[in-house]
Amino acid sequence: RTDAKRASQLRDILIRLGPTYVKLGQVLSSRQDLLPEPYVAELKQLQDQVPPFQDAIARRMIARELGAKEASRLEYVGASGRGEMAAPIASASLGQVYECVDAFTGKKVAVKVQRPGALCAVSLDVAIIRLIGPILYKINDKGGNLDAKALIDEWGARFVDELDYRMEARNALEFERAMRRRNDALGDSVFAPAVEPELSSRRILTAEWVEGTRLDEAEASEDKGRLCAVTLSAYLAMLLETGTLHVDPHPGNLLLSSDGRVCILDWGLVTRVTPRQQEAILTFISHLVAGDYQSLDSDLAIMGFVAADKMEALNDSGLTRAVGTLFAAVAQGGGAQGFRKELGFTQSDEELREMGKEIRKIKGRNKKETEQLRRDAFIGMTGGQESKVAQLSKDLEQVQEKYGNIFTIPSYFAYILRSFSVLEGIGLATDPDYSIAQDAFPFVARRLLTDRNEATKKALMGVLYGAGGDGKRLSTDRAKQLAEAFASYSETIPRESAAAAAAAAAVANGQQKGIPAGLKDALRIAFDPEGGPLQDVLLQEAARLTGATAASALNSTLATPFGSENAAMKALVSSGGTDTEAAEVAAIVWRTLSKQPEGKSTSAGAEEQDGGALLPLPLPLPLPTALPEMPEMPSPEEAREALDLAIELAPGMQLAAVRFGSSLLLDAAERLGSAASTLRKE
């Protein structure tokens, strides 16, 4: 009861303070893992239930901004008579929305009217925070590297831009065009409302009316996990591709439309991301989702999170270990509770509060001693000196003593953090164990396997072949992760009709056969006539498989008459990988994309290799010791599907065959070079 009362008081205070603080409340309302339920419920009202201003004022603003002729086209739904206004259907920090009909077209539209005095209120907030913010920061964190003024300037500039509805219209149009240009299903799964330019101005925005429900209020029958994945993929596309990121994604701005698409509203608050920043962020996300935590400290430096005069700290193993521990906990999911659990905390929220009270009672002879005693007490309460928390604390303390404060927050990243923090909160409301890092992997996998940009290719090689991407040994675990994530994206993102959903379910249950969506998508990309990263990797590994098999056969043939293996021949076989390694990669990719169960061969049997180990074959090859079983005849629909796909892929397959020949020559040259080097050493 006390929490509910205080939460209501907090909401009223934020409303009285003005738009800046209402925005803060909107962000907090999405973080159910950080705030008690009564606070979330009250702050949620700030998303679209802020007390509105008078309708008469709104009507005068519309007439002044649009002119009497254009304003007369708007008929207000629910009004008591012609020329009258109805109450707004939503009211937020900077404006309120009316449901109308455009008398000229007969279409229903949404009309957003800016709050009177919004620009003055926002400008005053920015000026005050800019004046006292840096001073307070220096007092509280004397050794900090944060450029508080740059952060405030970035925040203030974006906030003021939000008040120009003409810019909001351009942002929405830019996103809609980007989605239409996409060659995957995401473009058909998410959209922004079309703006009516002749009924819009700097302070009035008129857009198409979208029938739907808030994403967080979608029916239980809807796959909310899929909706979260689609929404996150759309934001990753903005972050990593279009360069214009919508940074106000609270549930009031996200709708599930009646046709099953995700609609993103309110495009006033955006931030720009440069190509260089996009490359750095993609590399960071790739390492994070692939579990390569050892590379994250360098990624953070490239992204601008390490102060320029602290770069030497990147060579410190303690920093690398601490960063890895922290981000490994973040990647596990579950929000704040999952983070604490991964670090070894077993206490409930109430127990942690009690611990805090007990620790604050501890006093030393001076400030430094007090901090040391409190830290030791905290470690003792959370697992002792051998715990993960203790090791993390030790590493961070040692790094702090050597280098001072290392990390900062670059000004461009503040809004990015805000945006994805809110998205994580929405995911956690659907699934308490939600991991935004894992949910991002399917989009990132597709981007890595399709983008021809050199920086993206380098990131892909780093994920598959380790730091530096030298191409010597492909990680089968990483290959499997990428293949599974790629297949997941191809099957999760598309909107399915009832008939398509039933057909997909039948295929999944084995009641009907067909080419899986993930496999078709992968084949189209793999045999793109223009090539691409996926094709490069597949051809390289196919050449390894062919070269290793041929070298192994040659080695066995020569070893039989002479009774022993030559060292040069061993080098010829092992260089670039063995046939077992390469075949394992091929089998993993094939099983994953075709949804073949783990350990089950796609052929009538399996071939014995390496002392009897069963090698799953990615293609239906016959056994040498028995006649193959007659394959089941495909249905006419299956045959037509396969034929259409073959015709579509034919040009790309011809070019891929030429490139495969080149890859074979390179593999052969590498093996011969390794053998020659071994002979010279002998």
Image: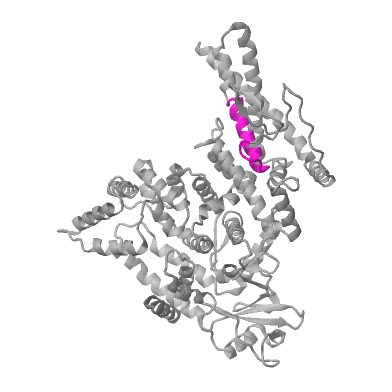
| 249 or 591, nearer to the observer | 591
Residue 625 in percent (x, y) is at 72, 21
The residue positioned 28% from the left and 52% from the top of the image is: 379
Q: Can residue 268 be seen?
A: no
584 part of magenta stretch: yes
Nearest to the observer: residue 628 or residue 76: 628
146 lies above or below 206? above
Q: Residue at x 64, y 34 (%)?
A: 586
Residue pushed farthest left? 365
Extreme residue in the top direction: 562
**Near-viewer residue (16 or 198):** 16
Majority secondary structure in the magenta region: helix
Q: Position of residue 32 (x, y in %)?
A: 46, 66
Q: What is the span of residues highlighted in magenta in the rendered image? A: 576-599
Q: Would you identify the image quadrant in which residue 596 lies?
A: top right
Q: Is residue 392 visible?
A: yes
Q: Is residue 189 above or below residue 516?
A: below
User: How does the figure colour the protein chain or chains?
Assistant: one colour
